[in-house]
Image (cartoon, rainbow, N blue to C red):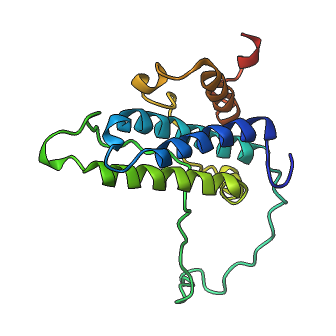
Amino acid sequence: MTPSRPLPEIWYPLAQFLLALRALIRAASPDGFAAIAARVRRELRLTSALVRRYLFAVAYGITLPPPRATRPPADPYTVNSGPGLRRREPAFDPGERPGACRSAHPAGPSAPEPGIQWAVALNSAESLLAVLRNPLPAPRRLAFRFARDKAPPLRELPVPSHVLCAVPPALDALLMRLDALARPDAWEGMHPDTG
């Protein structure tokens, strides 16, 4: 594993796909974004699933140092909760949570304007690229969560079926390979490269 680009055989194709998606979003004008909005949403869902599984795959490859011995607190009934102790949320949450069922094509007055959709899509692509530029902090946190059996779950189906049926074969193979690396227990006894 290289320090800046873990799993380079996966990182580089993933980064190229994400850069192409960002270029597609940037090339579209905010007003004319409605014509490609459905395609961009599908590709963003696929890309976020790929990045999420990439982070899990990197986390499985991290070797943690042995746990440090800690001293027991003086009084087991008191909790150290000073004002400086705060929990930081990661910029990209690698866990998948079940979301509310949304319509594939929002209609009516609640549908956001194409300019807003364009800005949200560009922001999502930029966020995923930021995770790929510095891919080690999130997997380190995941590795510690694996050690404590508190890792967030990954869905069995990485993306909805309507997204999966539109995936080109090269990205489908990459998604299957990443899923095998990110969920080794689910792929136990099967090897995705043997065809």
Left or right of 120, for residue 106? left
17 above or below 84? Answer: above
Q: Quarter of the image holding residue 131?
A: bottom right
Instruction: Determine the residue positioned at 84% across, 60% down.
Output: 66
Left or right: residue 68 compared with residue 38: right
Task: Report whether 123 appears left or right of 15.
Answer: left
- In the image, taking residue 96 as reference, residue 60 lies left or right, namely right
- Give the image location of residue 40, x and y in percent: 43, 38
Task: Please report the residue visible at 27 percent of the width from the left and 38 percent of the height from the top.
Answer: 102
Q: Nearer the viewer, residue 182 or 168?
A: 168
Q: Could you say which quadrant of the image residue 193 lies in?
A: top right
The outermost residue toward the top is: 195
* Image quarter in which the N terminus is found: top right
Residue ID at (41%, 38%): 41
Q: Quadrant of the C terminus?
A: top right
Toward the viewer: 35 or 129? 35
Q: Position of residue 125 (x, y in %)?
A: 52, 50
Residue positioned 55% across, 39% down in the render: 47
* Rendering coords of residue 114 (x, y %): 29, 48
Residue 84 in view: yes
